Image (cartoon, rainbow, N blue to C red):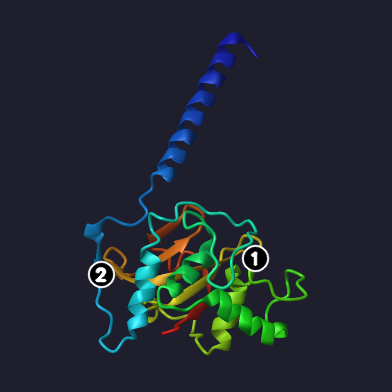
Amino acid sequence: MNRYLSTSVLFVLALFAGAACRQQIARAVKPSKPPEQQTETRALPGNSSPNLKLVIDGAIEQIGKTTSYDPSYQKIEYPNGDVPMETGVCSDVIVRAFRKAGIDLQKDVHDDMKANFSAYPTRWGLKGTDPNIDHRRVPNLQTYFTRKGKSLATDGGSETFLPGDIVTWDLQLGGTEHVGMVVDVWYKPTQRYLIVHNIGNGTRMEDVLFAWKITGHYRYF
């Protein structure tokens, strides 16, 4: 390789590296929710449970507070245990939101698993319950909500997914599951409600209802 070619290659690599850095920076500063002019908060039905609004607000309140994602196993208190608010996983968004309405999914899932252990997934090779992690696993939340009669169809249009609904997806990354909550913020460009979730960059509000394959749809209230 002559000197001129070597210099050219280094120049191209430098440009590529610079572009990659700019892309990473762009991703890092991506807004945690759409601009206000593109959204509107819609009123819930008058006959809604007061807990519905509490849970929705509990999910939205996490935006800007939970700014990272950490899937590592953590020993936490029981009941009402939690990892530090600034971090967590997708299921923690749901657990924290429900606690705003006085519902502790850590305890509820643990109690149901303890009484009905064989009804829950066994993919992790567990021989018993673990209140540190059971409620933080999406398949366990799916099983719990289904057992409580909260499951709805997954193949409807956006109009069938209402504020407060819990949605699970298959990210098609080696069987990786994800969960988020539909909130009462209407997104004008696509004419549907937004999702609050944490998929790796902290809790965010985004238009991702149909971004992945929907595997579960639950309405608790």
Kind of residue at badge 1:
Gly
Residue closest to the eye, 212 or 126: 126
Indicate the secondary structure of the residue bearing disc 2. Answer: strand
Locate residue 28: give its quadrant: top left
Kind of residue at badge 2:
Thr
Residue 168 location in percent, x, y?
A: 52, 72
Residue closest to the eye, 132 or 199: 132
Q: Residues within 10 Å of mark 2 (few under 14, many from 20)?
A: few
Which quadrant: the C terminus?
bottom left
Residue at 61 percent across and 64 percent down: it is: 176
Residue at 42 percent across and 78 percent down: it is: 165
Residue 182 location in percent, x, y?
A: 39, 72
Residue closest to the eye, 146 or 7: 146
What residue is shown with label 2?
A: 41
> Is residue 209 visible in the rendered structure shown here?
yes
What residue is shown with label 1?
A: 175
Lower sequence index among marks 2 and 1: 2
Residue 143 location in percent, x, y?
A: 60, 81
